[in-house]
Amino acid sequence: MAHEAVIGLECHIQLKTRSKMFCGCPAEFGAAPNANTCPVCLGLPGALPVGNRAAVDAALRLGLALGSGIRRESVFARKHYFYPDMPKNFQITQYDQPLCEGGALPVRIGETLRLFELIRVHVEEDTGKSFHPERYGDRQISRVDFNRAGVPLLELVTRPVFREPAECAAFLTALRRLVRWLGISDGDMEKGQLRCDANVSIRPTGTEALGTKTELKNLNSIKGVEKGLTAEIARQRQVVEGGGRIEQATLLYDADHDKLAVMRSKEHAHDYRYFPEPDLPVLRIEPAWLSAAGEALPELPWARAERLAGQYGLPAYDAAILCDQRELADYYEALVGEGVDPKKASNWIMTEMLRHLKTAAVGVAQWQRHVPVGHFAFVIKSVETAQATATNAKGVLDELFQHGGDPATIYVERGIKATSSTDELLPLVRAVIEENAGPVAQYLGGKTATLGFLVGQVMKKSGGQAVPQTVRELLESELAKRAAPR
Amino acid sequence: MSAAREAWRLSATALAARVRAGELTAVEAVESGWEGPGAEWEADVRAVAHADAAARRAGADAAGGRAGSGALLGVPVLVKDNLCTVDYPTTCASRILAGYRSPYDATVITRLRSAGAVVTGKGNMDEFAMGSSTEFSCYGPTRNPFDRERVPGGSSGGPAAAVAYGLCPIGLGSDTGGSVRQPAAFCGVFGLKPTYGRLSRYGLVAFGSSLDQVGIFARHAGDAAAAYAALAGPDPYDATTRLTPAPDVSAWDQGVRGLRFGWPANLWREGVEREVIEGLEEAAGWLERAGATRVPLEFLPGGYGVATYYLVATAEASSNLARFDGVRYGFRHTDSPDVRALYTRTRSEGFGPEVQRRILLGTYALSAGYYDAYYLMAQRARTRIRREYEAAFARCDVLLMPAAPTLPFRLGEKTDDPLSMYLSDIFTIGANLAGIPGLTAPVGLTAANGRPALPRAVQLLGPDDSEPRLLAAGRVIEVRGDAKRLDGKHETEFTWPTKR
């Protein structure tokens, strides 16, 4: 019997607010251990939490973007378990009355736009970080850094809507894009800004009932999520097909060795003893707050991709890539606003700009500092208006990206212009034909592909200024004269 | 010289006035209580958990340096050992916090200091405020100054006893189920539990967060009003404080003409000692003499009050006390093979038996499968209790009722019987469940009936923010209903305990 997998994800998004969820300590990453702490986030006796409005704002933004229902009154709750990196031995989170319920994330997979439904999004605090075990003299010790304790998190829980690990990877990629797009998190999984646990079970294909699930933790990259799930689904299939039964358990995935280890079995499941946090009032979202959050919401990536395709006549593929990052889409539209042809602008961004960004491993902001929209538009237009060849324009773009500067000045300094004048080019064409007897013979012998090489030689001689199309035409007519008369 | 020596007899407001006028130094004001009554009583009563002459002196010097200002300038205050102070240990009378020093002052401590008051030490208490006798302290019991064979009440027994015997005119305690009002009654002093959310809980080591409220002990109604005025009001560090300004209590000496006080005699039909009832009758007479009207009414705020209280309080306590695990501060069991053993051993040895009992009760009440039946049910009952109080306050302005069903009981009398100990809170827990304010007012002593004369007291309860009228009624009781002596300028003589 064939089995299909059923997967649900639980994602944690670390918010990039200035201060922590329940105190005024900086929420920043990278300070000296325990530097960003105070009585509240250390859980000292007598300390009390006070909610961070900016974090709730971020949660509202995400909830609204996902089309979730926003509770006008949601409740913080305490979730209890003992662990040294949790200062109060309970975590302040939300339980039966979360801020956001329902909603869905649209994810483009191949040609289709899938809607992955959510159960909830709620606000909570992060724990500290344990480092263990370490040698200390003749003992093994653990150390705890509480800088992260109390940093605001959003927990997002999906319905069990995934059937394939690849769908989960696509979902996470889209979620990462969204939180960055909304400016609420950097969403870097390697830095723990986006974390993912997965619940997975299998069932005979075509049946409805859910099988016994296992929970996968420690999936700290998108690739890791895909690989871990693939491994776990394979394990479950093997167990079931071998006549065994799946035991409910929490598993840790070791990405380095592609191995799963049992963290705790059902018998050791926690009783978290949730109850409403008595130190915090009910979280009331006044209508004015909600509408302000709605108005502050940017055009969402999937809507913007659709608009770009429609408004500028771009292929869906181009629009999707341009909407990978909000800054990129902004840059694109600004470029078009400078009078650049929309499809040409898209081509230049996708081929030139993104190639540079990838090679240099930098972001749009960095590019923009060196190549303001106006400068990029100047370069592209110089080609369109045949003032420069694409080759030379790309060279200038390279220079701009590396060192900045004004393209108009660089054009003058380099003496760049585009030449299609027969008077100027014909001597060069003839010279190239004289100097390349071999290739010429090949061409005349029927190997027409050699023409490209000859065009290149002429271009070189012209200092990149010859317009390739003109060169090609001149070469063809000159070579035709040399062909043996039939 | 003699004025400085006798300064401890003064009310807080009179003491502050002399310090402001330069007739006394803050140091004299603070040390007078230690040199006179402190030397005479403290060794027997043991009201103080942490004393520190140097810290006291530094506090008095800091207050003295502000010359001329401060409603409580130079006034010594013994504060319960569960209020965080930077200059004294804060241990909640528990081994698990042995030697713990808070890096910050509780908000009420900051406000005390900015009013010029001086923390004169930390008061003894039942461990983590769990108890009604101040016998469950790792420092040993505090005794009642009126009869040292008897308890001072609890859990804030230390500050109550200290204010009664004269160490300081004002004390701070905490009241989760009566822990200020019941010891105030047992020690013959005023005890005010404000409306929930009026005094900041920031820096009060939490027991039952939704019930806890910092409370004030004083020998005079006017002093309680002065302390309330200095402490109450919104605190950005406590999200449960009310955002509106605290009610103005400056009319505490304006009498009770026209006040309707509820007289729920059904409450003391049985199970309440005769002397307690006599005290109620006497106080009612004084209120009537001052122009108030008695409104007899049936009032039974649920037979389930104690059950509700012990579910809510223990559930919250089990959560609040989870942080005491030996990992970051306080006592740690040193010989543990792993972190689980460290937790278990630290908590088993660090917490006393009553605290462990309540943690277990609360953990059980919150457990999966029991939550709905216990905690959730208790919250529903709580809403109902609050409505019952609201209904009563539709018919009267305040309720006059006992603070405790008995006079101070003997040491050891109830320590082995938790349930009877819990029942000594029966008249006080309602105010915590409903979030309303309450005031204990002393009504003088019983006759010496083959035992030392013991304090009697009544409790006044009112709706949210009724502190002004509770204090005004308290003042009327203080002056035995004599309208001519209501004015704050009249120093009233306090009923002091006497050495046998």
Image (cartoon, rainbow, N blue to C red):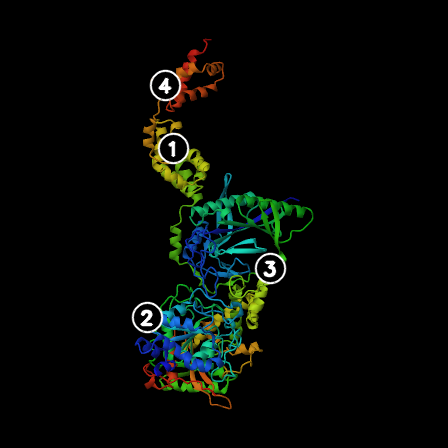
Could you tell me which chain the residue with mark 1 belongs to?
A: A
**What's the mark number on residue B338?**
3
Could you tell me which chain the residue with mark 4 belongs to?
A: A
**What's the mark number on residue B66?**
2
Q: Quadrant of the N terminus of chain A?
A: top right
Say above or below: B123 vs B456. above
> Label 4: which residue?
A425
Discs 3 and 1 share one subunit: no
- Badge 2 crowding class, 10 Å Cα cut-off, few under 14, some 14 to 19, many 20 or more, is some
Please indicate, yes or no, whether residue A59 appears anywhere in the rendered image: yes
User: Residue farthest to the right?
Assistant: A243
- For badge 1, the amino acid type reads Glu
Q: Is residue A430 left or right of residue B177?
A: left
Q: Nearer the viewer, residue A17 or B429?
A: A17
Q: Position of residue A327 (x, y in %)?
A: 40, 42
Could you tell me which chain the residue with mark 3 belongs to?
A: B
Q: Position of residue A207 (x, y in %)?
A: 62, 48
- Residue at 36% over, 67% down: B244
- The reply to whether callout 4 and callout 2 are in contact (CB within 8 Å) is no
**Quadrant of res B254:** bottom left
Q: CA distance from mark 1 to mark 4?
A: 27 Å
Discs 1 and 4 share one subunit: yes
1 or 2: mark nearer the eye:
2
